[in-house]
Image (cartoon, grey):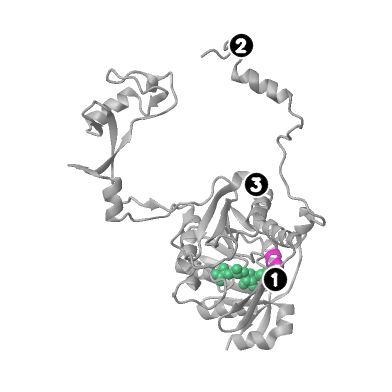
Amino acid sequence: MATGIPSSSVSEKTILASLKSKQPYSLPKGNAVTIHYPNKNLEAKILLPITNNFVKIENNHFFPIKFFQENDLIFSDNIFALHQLINQRANFDLIYLDPPYNTGYDFNSKSNGHSYSDNFDLSEYIEFMRIRLILLRELLSDKGSIYIHIGHQMLHYIKVIMDEVFGTKNFRNLIVRKKCSSKNYTKNQYPNLNDYILFYSKGNDFIWNPQGTKPTEEWIKKEYPKVDEKGQFKLVPIHAPGERNGETGKKWRGMLPPKGKHWQYTPSKLDELDKNGEIHWSKTGNPRRKVYLTDDKLIPLTDYWENFRDAYHQSIKTTGYPTEKNLSMLEAIVRSSSDSDSLILDPFCGSGTTLNAALNEGRKCIGIDQSLSAIEHTLQRLNNKLRLIVDEDVFNLFSLEILSILR
Ligand SMILES: C[S@@+](CC[C@H](N)C(=O)[O-])C[C@H]1O[C@@H](n2cnc3c(N)ncnc32)[C@H](O)[C@@H]1O
């Protein structure tokens, strides 16, 4: 078809170059992106040491302590406990936090009333979180990971703050977790079923133990439909996208790779696979590789978690704490991102789900919460497994209440 455009003189590059020169605005390049609001604290100020006194409680008496130790449950605003952990050079391989989501609600426990308020001004919330995330970064080991559980309300702000504090290159996943089944009625918006977990590592060399589930018979039949004397197998192409000039772009058994593709193996390796009976030839002469099912085959846990709904939304036994998370989910996180000698931190531990998961998986842990109700639920759940530490000022104000939950 005649277009009137002399095809030889107009290349894609020429078009792009001429469009670029017409752009009315310049685009900044190579800058770190940060979020701005008034009274944002300087990082250097946030990292200045803060000291605070803590006491341990034993047999109805309290004793000052100098250092936290593994399996401590700390009743305090986490800011003071985190500074103390930094002062004593603590190091965690895994930090999981499930902070307030800024929902605008007050949360009450099933059994003992008010648990915590979740109502911040927007910039107040962002800075509250940023301060704590900066302190948490200081506590994360070089092979460590941090997971933040968050609702849709603040997800996008927290993602930007995480990029700022931990670096975009350390972002690993945004996990979508189905938290409940679809019975939430909403009048003029879509019902909300999911919350989110942002997963970042401290660097490139982080602890990673892939998790998965054993395949069902039904899945195996669908994915590995063929059988021969070596076992069940599936067929996969032996070519991949992209043309190559080397060995993998050459003819094999008189055939070139399909247009725009290359062989996944050199012709000599393909000969070897064929000799071992690992190439399947179709009736029309199309070669494909046999991939056999192995005993250790797992279906990998992806970034969509639909099988970790909160017990609160099902009729499974719970502690009664209003925002208690799914224990199996925390166990999966602990297995994925820590080793048996790892120390794990939850600075907003609520009813102690992370601590429970860590102890179940044979790890050591530290939990922090500023709510008496949270401390009570955690102690009920993990009776005798944790040492209770209290901010001295909190103890002086609430000693009777604190001692009463220990009875
Ligand atoms: C969403 S809940 C955590 C629930 C927990 N993941 C569980 O499974 O039970 C958030 C917790 O953060 C605590 N919290 C809020 N602000 C805090 C602060 N500054 N320091 C320590 N804990 C805080 C609240 O008391 C509440 O228990």
In the image, 350: left or right of 261? right
What residue would you read off at disc 3? 167
Q: Quadrant of the C terminus?
A: bottom right
Question: Would the CB of label 1 be found within 8 Å of ligand 1?
Answer: yes
Q: Residues within 10 Å of mark 2 (few under 14, many from 20)?
A: few
Residue 70 x/y as whole percent: 57, 69
Residue 370 in the image, given as x and y percentages of width and height = 67, 74
- Residue wearing tag 1: 77
Image height check: is 273 above or below 118? above
303 above or below 150?
above
Q: Residue furthest right?
A: 39
Disc 3 or 1, which lies upstream in sequence?
1
Q: Which residue is located at x 27 percent, y 20 percent? A: 253
Between 57 and 327, the one lying in front of the other is: 327
Answer with the quarter of the image where residue 346 lies. Answer: bottom right
- Give the SS element for disc 2: loop
Q: Position of residue 208 (x, y in %)?
A: 48, 51
Q: Which residue is mark 2?
A: 9
Q: From the viewer's perspective, tell me whether residue 214 is left or right of residue 28.
A: left
What's the residue at 67%, 83% (across, down)?
62
Mark 1: amino acid = Asp
From which residue to which does the magenta span run?
77-83
Q: Is residue 346 above or below residue 290?
A: below
The yes-or-no answer for disc 2 within 8 Å of ligand 1 is no
Residue at 74%, 50% (x, y): give it.
35
Residue 263 at x, y percent in the picture: 36, 26
Q: Amino acid at mark 2?
A: Ser
Callout 1: helix, strand or loop? loop
